[in-house]
Image (spheres, rainbow, N blue to C red):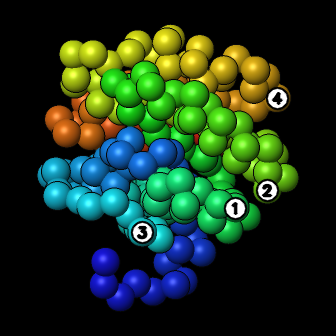
Amino acid sequence: MGIIKSKQFRKLPQVLLIGLDSAGKSTLLFRQQRGVVMETSPTVGFNVATVELDKKTSLTVWDVGGQETMRSNWKYYLEECKVLVFVVDSSDRARMGDAQKALKKVLNDEHLKGVPLMVLANKKDLTNSMTIREVSTLLDLDSYMDRVWEIQACSALNGLGLQQAFISIAKLLKKS
């Protein structure tokens, strides 16, 4: 990403973008930041990007790798998290149980107490994608009554719902 001044990140709210591998986290982030689809490879470690929503609103977004071996490292990114964004592949029914377990584990961390949650049901452009109600049910989102959460469908490839999702993330930041 090049050289980035560390002071910049202290001034902007931190958004943590996590989810299982192949959910489309990096594609989604770079699509929103740059307006184009970039070829990505599995994230080893993390990506950091500043997403400008308008002249007054910018978000620092940390995109952390979601491979099974990387998930134990998620805890190191939680301390300064102001909004958690959990991305799921809405066309991958077979892995929703794994996604539900990963989300539950991370939300139980003490650093995320009271932190708002945004679930992005990515890959909505695929014909076999689940509805947000199905994704919500499979992730057991209704059980998180002590937390503000939202769920939105989106597509990193065609940009469907991304701008609205990031506007909602900014609103969650203001509420927290």
Percent x, y for residue 48?
43, 68
Which secondary structure lies at badge 1? helix
- Label 1 sits on residue: 75
Which of the labelled discs sits on residue 44, or is there none?
A: 3
Say which mark, if any, is on residue 146.
4
CA distance separating discs 1 and 2: 9 Å
Asked if residue 75 is positioned above or below residue 3 in the image, the reply reads above
Closer to the N terminus: mark 4 or mark 3? 3
The answer to whether marks 1 and 2 mark residues whose Cβ atoms lie closer than 8 Å is yes
Tell which circle, 1 or 2, labels the residue nearer the N-terminal end: 1
Disc 4 marks a residue whose amino acid type is Asp
x and y percent of residue 99 in the render? 55, 35
Q: Which residue is mark 2?
A: 111
2 vs 3, front mark = 3
Classify 10 Å Cα crowding around label 4: few (below 14), some (14-19), many (20 and above). Answer: few
Coordinates of residue 13 in the picture (x, y in percent): 58, 60
**Mark closest to the chain's N terminus, 2 or 4:** 2
Amino acid type at circle 3 is Val
Q: CA distance from mark 2 to mark 3?
A: 23 Å
- Residue located 57% across and 19% down the image: 138
Q: Secondary structure at mark 4?
A: loop
Of the image marks 1 and 4, the number of the one nearer the N terminus: 1
Question: Considering only order in the chain, which callout, 3 or 1, is on the residue closer to the N terminus?
Answer: 3
